[in-house]
Image (cartoon, rainbow, N blue to C red):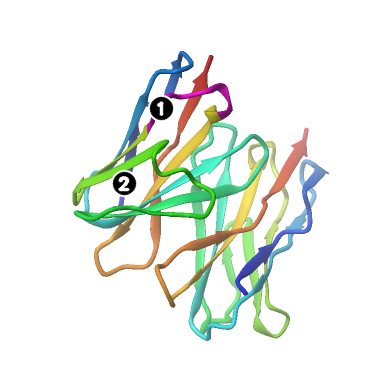
Amino acid sequence: GAVVSQHPSRVICKSGTSVKIECRSLDFQATTMFWYRQFPKKSLMLMATSNEGSKATYEQGVEKDKFLINHASLTLSTLTVTSAHPEDSSFYICSALKAGGYEQYFGPGTRLTVT
Amino acid sequence: AQKVTQAQTEISVVEKEDVTLDCVYETRDTTYYLFWYKQPPSGELVFLIRRNSFDEQNEISGRYSWNFQKSTSSFNFTITASQVVDSAVYFCALLTTSGTYKYIFGTGTRLKVLA
């Protein structure tokens, strides 16, 4: 199998605080993980590509200082939304690429609400 | 340029009707993969099918069928005898093998199956 988990599944935080979202590949090693953001009734927007042991590559228009990505091991990547604001409220989805593979396996998503 | 177009934003059908979701893609790569995902209200992306560019054989899986036509750059998805549980957003995605294995998602088609 190829199972990817995300934690938490849902989080509500106050404006100005930071939130960390974890993405784990449970039964395989993922050299590359991707982070997506999805606005209501919209498509998935790729935010960044995260490679194990190196800095993430951010898509144009994504603030790297606001969305901190760490991929410290072959099974874990984290996305930290720093100093969150209500406009950061969104559905965040991660995906993982098996070593040597090309197909992404998606996590169940994290719904972030900033009040 | 790489692009996926799902021209149908929303479709409503009555239960038991057949429905086809359109997907048109653009790529200059000769090797690529096409995917369909289902996103129910829970938000989790459910993998439905993967097709590579060298395999134009149509596929049927239960009530689902896919028609891949390279000549028209289309990868359409048909649900036969639709059911209320089919109500979801459906995304078509393109993966090219040049570069960093990024997925290019279409904007999605929201399918509502009415009882």
Q: Which mark is residue A3?
A: 2
Which residue is under mark 1?
Answer: A9
Dividing the picture into quadrants, the one containing residue A9 is top left
Q: Amino acid at mark 2?
A: Val
Please indicate whether residue B74 sits to the left or right of residue A101 in the image: right
Q: Position of residue B86 (x, y in %)?
A: 65, 43
Magenta includes A82? yes
In percent of the image, x 68 and y 38: which residue is there?
A41
> From the viewer's perspective, is residue A53 above or below residue B53?
above
Determine whether the residue tagged by mark 1 lies in a helix, strand or loop. loop
Please indicate whether residue A65 sits to the left or right of residue A74 in the image: right
**Mark 1, chain letter?**
A
Q: How many marks?
A: 2
> From the viewer's perspective, is residue A90 above or below residue B69?
above
Please indicate whether residue A98 sits to the left or right of residue B50 in the image: left
Q: Position of residue A97 (x, y in %)?
A: 33, 58
**Mark 2, chain letter?**
A
Q: Position of residue A58 (x, y in %)?
A: 42, 53
Q: CA distance from mark 2 to mark 1?
A: 15 Å
Residue placed most toward the observer, B113 or A14: A14
Dividing the picture into quadrants, the one containing residue B78 is bottom right
**Callout 1 environment at 10 Å: few (<14), some (14 to 19), or many (20+)?**
some
The magenta span reads A81-87
Q: Amino acid at mark 1?
A: Ser
